[in-house]
Amino acid sequence: MKFGNVLILAATLATAILPLTNVASAQIVALGASNVEGYGVSSSEAWPAQLESLLRAKGSSAHITNAGVSGNTTGEVLARLSSAVPDGTRVVILGIGAFNDVRTGGSVDGARANIATIKKQLAGRGIRVVDALGTMKSVMHQPGMLQADHIHLTAEGHHRLAMQLAGSVR
């Protein structure tokens, strides 16, 4: 076999193997506003970082990108969807509701419509969506899980949310 043929064979094998590597380290994006970003806690205490640690402890090589932006409305999340969720993303954990929309003069119905559009666009790209809002709300209603502003999760709240989401994300 000539040297050139060896290079072609190596390139062909690399092309065949790389997609398998990407599946093993599936990209996950946590998408939302301040309670995704981790407002009021360190980045390592925010639930996306804690969830990644939990998944790694179970043997997963998945990486979670924290795409939470404090203050974002559902319309703003929708507007940055393409840049926040890159090609190769397998799962989006969506953690946004109508709070910021209503706070800035929007409506609950408008927020619901934007969330439905976000989910539809992600599904159209073949990305599985885990809706974390219900789980987030249940954690928020437990004693000691909210900061003094009664809006943002404490470090313990982020930890509990990560624990509860761990079973939903593979």
Image: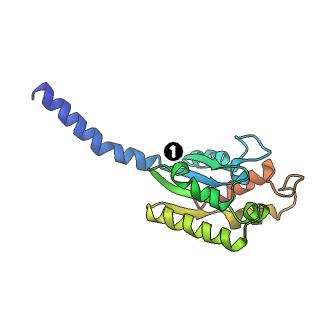
Q: Residue furthest bottom?
A: 109
Q: Residue furthest right?
A: 148
In the displayed structure, 63 sits above or below 122; it is: above
Please tell me which residue lies in front, 100 or 164. Answer: 100
Q: Residue at x 58, y 70 (%)?
A: 116
Within-10-Å neighbours for mark 1: few <14, some 14–19, many 20+: some
Q: Is residue 170 visible?
A: no
Please provide percent x and percent y for residue 10.
Answer: 23, 34
Quarter location, residue 125? bottom left
**134 lies left or right of 30:** right
**143 lies left or right of 118:** right
Q: Residue at x 47, y 46 (%)?
A: 25
Q: Residue furthest front?
A: 105
- Amino acid bearing label 1: Ser
Please tell me which residue lies in front, 35 or 142. Answer: 35
Q: How is the image coloured?
A: rainbow
Please tell me which residue lies in front, 159 or 48. Answer: 48
Element type at mark 1 = loop
In the displayed structure, 111 sits above or below 156; it is: below
Q: Residue at x 61, y 54 (%)?
A: 31
Please provide percent x and percent y for residue 32.
Answer: 65, 55
Q: Residue furthest left?
A: 1
Q: Quadrant of the N terminus?
A: top left
Q: Is residue 122 visible?
A: yes
- Tally of marks: 1
Quarter location, residue 168? bottom right
Please provide percent x and percent y for residue 83.
Answer: 53, 49
**132 lies left or right of 92:** right
**64 lies left or right of 109:** left
Mark 1, residue position: 61
Please provide percent x and percent y for residue 59.
Answer: 53, 46
